[in-house]
Amino acid sequence: MVTNAGQEILEKLWIDTVEGENEFVELKKLGREGTINRLAKSEHVVISDNRVKLTPKGNREAKKVIRRHRLAERLLHDVLDVGVDDMESAACKFEHIISEDVEESICTLLGHPRECPHGKPIPPIRCCKEGKEIAEKIVTSLSKLRKGQQGKIVYILTKNHKNLQKLLAMGILPGVPVEVIQTYPSYVFQAGQTQIAIDKEIADDIFVRFV
């Protein structure tokens, strides 16, 4: 079993090699030489000329760690409304304790997201492929709801910081129940005790679960 320290090394190797443009990572840049040696003995990495590379076995394990970390970020950011400053350290702790069953439940809850809050890809697995059709029926963007349909906000997925701040200021948060009042020319919906009007671009970024 890979230790927490080992998982962190595998995570860095994944980012620098699989997502980066490097074939190897210099041993001195990784530190924790003892941990890396143990990873080499367990055949998760290969060390050659003071450079470290993931093996196929290490690649599979690193992918799991990256996935758990970025799903944790998504959960903390979208559902628990944890600030960016605290999100990273909390996600680092989450990634080591989330079991496979819990991971799949989180992924399904979030609608099988493709990216973390920083815009980095979340590696898909079986639950994403098998659950895609079901998820699309359960979780959808607010812009796809018809007049009179109701749901509960699950998460907000946007790279527009101003739009996000605007929604948060209006109380548009995960867990808030919504009902569509109007879809044209703008989207008007009831959120709690407040009626809110937004354009389609912003409505596309709000994802709700049908109730």
Image (spheres, grey):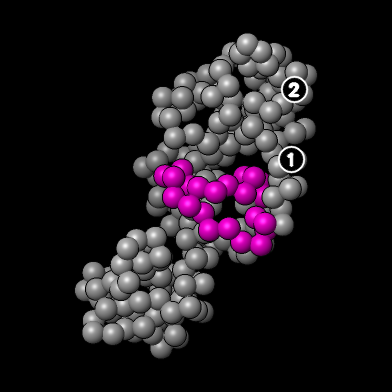
Nearest the eye: 105 or 115: 115
Q: Residue at x 71, y 45 (%)?
A: 135
Residue 113 shown left or right of residue 34 in the figure:
right
Q: Label 1 crowding class (10 Å Cα cut-off): few <14, some 14-19, many 20+?
A: some
Q: Which residue is mark 1?
A: 138
- Vertical placement of 22 versus 67: above or below? below
Residue farthest bottom in this picture: 41
Residue placed at 48% from the left, 52% from the top? 121
| 209, above or below 16, in the image | above
- Can you tell which of label 1 and label 2 is closer to the viewer? 2
Residue 31 seen from this side: no
Q: Taking the image as drawn, is residue 53 in sight?
A: yes
The percent coordinates of residue 46 (x first, y second) are 36, 83
Q: Position of residue 59 (x, y in %)?
A: 47, 72
Q: Position of residue 136 (x, y in %)?
A: 71, 42
Name the residue tied to disc 2: 146
Amino acid type, residue under disc 2 in the picture:
Arg
Is 187 colored magenta in this rendering? no
Report the front residue among 122 and 89. 122
Corner quadrant of residue 26: bottom left
The magenta-colored residue range is: 108-129
**What secondary structure is marked by label 2?**
loop
